[in-house]
Image (tube, helix red, strand yellow):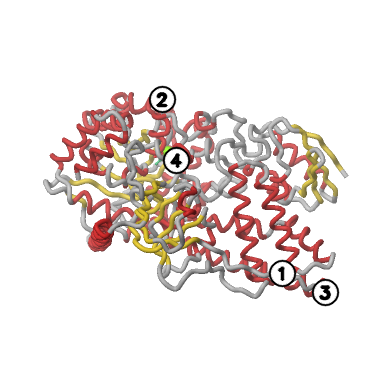
Amino acid sequence: MKEQDMTIHNPTGLHARPAKVFVNTAKQYQSDIRVQHGAKKANAKSLISMLTLGVECGSEIRISVDGADEEEALAALVTAVSSGLGEEEHMPAQTAVSHPAPPNGHQTTTSPTAVLPANMIKGIPAAPGIAIGPIYHLQHEEITVDETFRGASEEEAALQKAIERARGQLVTLRQQMLQSTSASEAAIFEVHQEILEDPDLLDAVLERIHRQQSAARAWQITIDSRAKAMAALNDPLLAGRAADIQDVGYRVLRLLMGGDEQQVSLPDHPVILVATDLSPSDTASLNRGKILGFCTAAGGPTAHSAIIARALSLPAVVSAGTAVLNIPNLTPVILNGSDGTLTIEPDSAAVAQAQASQQQWQAAITRAAASAAEPAITQDDHRVEVVANIGGLKDAQKAASAGAEGVGLLRTEFLFLERTEAPTELEQFEVYRDVVQAMSGQPVIVRTLDIGGDKPLPYISVPSEANPFLGERGIRLCLNRPELLRQQLRAILRAAAFGPLRIMFPMIADLSEWRAARAMVAEVQAELGAPDVEVGIMIEVPSAALMADAFAREVDFFSVGTNDLTQYTLAMDRMHPSLAGKSDGLHPAVLRLIARTVEAAHANGKWVGVCGELGADPQAVPILVGLGVDELSVSVPAIPTVKAQIRSLTLTAVQTIAQEALQCSTAVDVRERMRTAV
Ligand code: PEP
Ligand code: MG
C-alpha cells in the first residue's frame, strides 16, 4: 500500500468539479483508493463520498492506494492535485448549465420598485407564455417500502434489475432531451446516471442487504443518508446535488416497488403545478396534457427545471418565494411566464385580459413559424439578418429549418468539454465541415475556444485563480497555449473549403490580443494555402467597446456578447441567482457601449451583430435594431418570433426609441419605456 498526505489548495476545497477530476483520475486505476480527511474516509472512485468529505481549502487529506497499479495511481493523483484538479471556483457544480439561460429571450421584468397588486406574487420569469387555471401542489406518489427480506441473492437481483431499468429510463430521457433541446440540457440526466453508478453508494446498499434488509429499505436508507450528508454541508451548490441524489433515489425506489415510469400524481383536470422546486425527472415526466405551467418557490432561471420547461414550451415562474406554497390547492390563478407573475384569484376582467394575451401569443407563434423562412425586413424596408446561436451539428440542422440565415455563433466549447483530452485537429475539422455543410451555403461564424473562468477543462491546467472570470479566460487562455489555438485554426480553415465560414475571437480586451490572434490566422492560412475568411471579435469586455473605433479599423466585424458585456459592465456575476433580476442587458450603460460599437463599426464600413441572450428579448429587439445592429444571433427556437417582431417594426420609429433608451437612467426605466413603446 502507498500513502501520501497532501494539502488541498483549491479555493473552494474538493468541490464538485475538482472532486470529479479526482474521481475520474482514480477510476482509471484498478487499485483500491481511499481518501481520509480527519475522521472521515471516502472511496476515491465515488463522487458522492468524495463530496461528503467536505474538504475545504487548506485541508490536509491522506491518499491511500492499494493494488497492482498503486504506484502509477498515486503518482497520477498527486500530479492531478498539484496541478489544481482542473481548478474552478465560482461555477455551480453542474455539468448541465454552462451558460446562463435567460427565459428564452422573453424576459420582461416588472419594475422591482413598482407596487404589486395585493393578489400578485412576483418571481423570476423562467419560460414564456401564460397559463390560466387552478394551482396544484406537487405531491410525489407515496411509496410504501416493503421491508420483507427475501434472501440476499433475491434482494440483490431485484436491486440490479431496478438500477438497470432506471439506467434505461435515464438514457431515454437524455435522448428525448437531445432531440427537443441541446446537449447541455440533456447532460442533467448524465449526472443522474453517474449517481446511479456510484460504487460507494452501491456498496453501502449491498452491505445493508447482507445485514438482511430488503433491497428497497436498504436503498431508501442509503439514499436518504447520502443526500442528508450532502445537504448538511451547508453549501448551496452541493444542496443541488443532494436534490439530484434524492431524484435518482426516488426513481429506483419506485421501480423496486413495482412502479414504472416516474409520474407526479395529478388530478384529472389540467393544473398549474406549484412546488418548492421541481426535480429534472419531475419536469421531464410531466404529463403535458395535464400541466398548464409551473411555479416554484425556489430555483432560478438557470435551474434544471427552468431549462427543461423552456424545452417543453411550458410557461414557468421560478423563485417566487415560499408564499406560493401557502396558496390553497386548486385556487384559480394566472401564471405569466413572460413577466414572472402569479395572480391569485384573478377577477373576471383580469382573466379575460389574460385569455386575450394567451390567444395573441399562440397566434403570434403560429404566424411566426409559418413565415420563418422569409427575411426580416422592417415596415420601411430595412433588413436585419437573423442567425442562430448553436452548440453543435444537431442545432445546425434545426437552425436551417427554423429559418436561420446562417450561424452567428458556433460555441466550439462543446467539442472540448466532458472529455479527458483535447479533440484532435481531424475531429474538429470534421465537425466544423459538417456544420458548414448543414447550413447549405449560409455563413457560419465559428468562435474559437472560450474556455476558462466558468468553463475549466481537466486536461488544461490553469493555476488556481482568485477571480477566474477576470483571469485566464477565452482568448487569453488560447494565446497562452498557442498550440491549442493553432490546431483549432487549422481545423477551422480546412473546413472553410466547404462553405462560407468566418472566425471570431472571444473575450478580446486589448488590441494586442486581437493582433496576436489575427496574425496566427494569417500564418495558418499561409501554411495551408487556405482561402481568405472574414475575422472578427466579440465585444464582451467594456474596454473593447470603448476602443471600438481602433478595433473597427482592423477587424472585419463585431459581435456583441451581451451576456458577458452585461456581467463586466455592471460587475455582476452572470450566474448569481440573487442578482439575476438586476443583471439586465437593457441597462443604459450596456446600451451606450453597444451604440458606441455600432457607430465605430459603421464609420469604418464594418457590420455588427449581437449574439448574447439580449438579442432575443422582445423588449430589446426594437432598441438593438434602432441602434443600427445589423444582425441578431439568437437561440434556434427564438428565430421565427424575432424575425416576425422585426417585420412589425419601423426603423425610423425604433431609432427614436433607441435614442430615448440611451437617455434613461436605469434598466427598469428602459423596460418601463418599452412597455408603452411597442
Ligand atoms: C455572451 O457573452 O454574450 C456570449 C454570447 O458568449 P457566452 O454566453 O458563450 O459567454
Ligand atoms: Mg461570452
Residue 332 in view (yes/no): yes
SS class, disc 2? loop
Whether residues under marks 3 and 4 lie with C-beta atoms below 8 angstroms apart, the answer is no
How far apart, in angstroms, are the residues tagged by discs 4 and 1? Answer: 44 Å
Please tell me which of labels 2 and 4 falls first in the chain: 4
Q: Hey, what amino acid is under mark 4? A: Thr
> Which residue matches tag 2?
510
Q: Hey, what amino acid is under mark 1? A: Gln
How far apart, in angstroms, are the residues tagged by discs 2 and 3? Answer: 69 Å
The quarter of the picture showing ligand 2: top left
Q: Nearer the viewer, mark 3 or mark 1?
A: 3
Q: Counting other residues with Cα less than 10 Å from the Cα at mark 2, is it few (<14), some (14-19), or many (20 or more)?
A: few
Q: Counting other residues with Cα less than 10 Å from the Cα at mark 1, is it few (<14), some (14-19), or many (20 or more)?
A: some
655 sits left or right of 552 in the view: left
Q: Hey, what amino acid is under mark 2? A: Asp
Q: Nearer the viewer, mark 2 or mark 1?
A: 1
Residue 501 in view (yes/no): no
6 sits left or right of 369 in the view: right
SS class, disc 3? loop
Residue in the image at 60% along x and 58% along y: 192
> Which residue matches tag 1?
160
When the figure is inspected, residue 434 is found, relative to residue 558, above or below; the finding is below
The quarter in which the C terminus is drawn is top left
Q: Hey, what amino acid is under mark 3? A: Gly
Q: Nearer the viewer, residue 619 or 269?
A: 269
> Which residue matches tag 4?
448
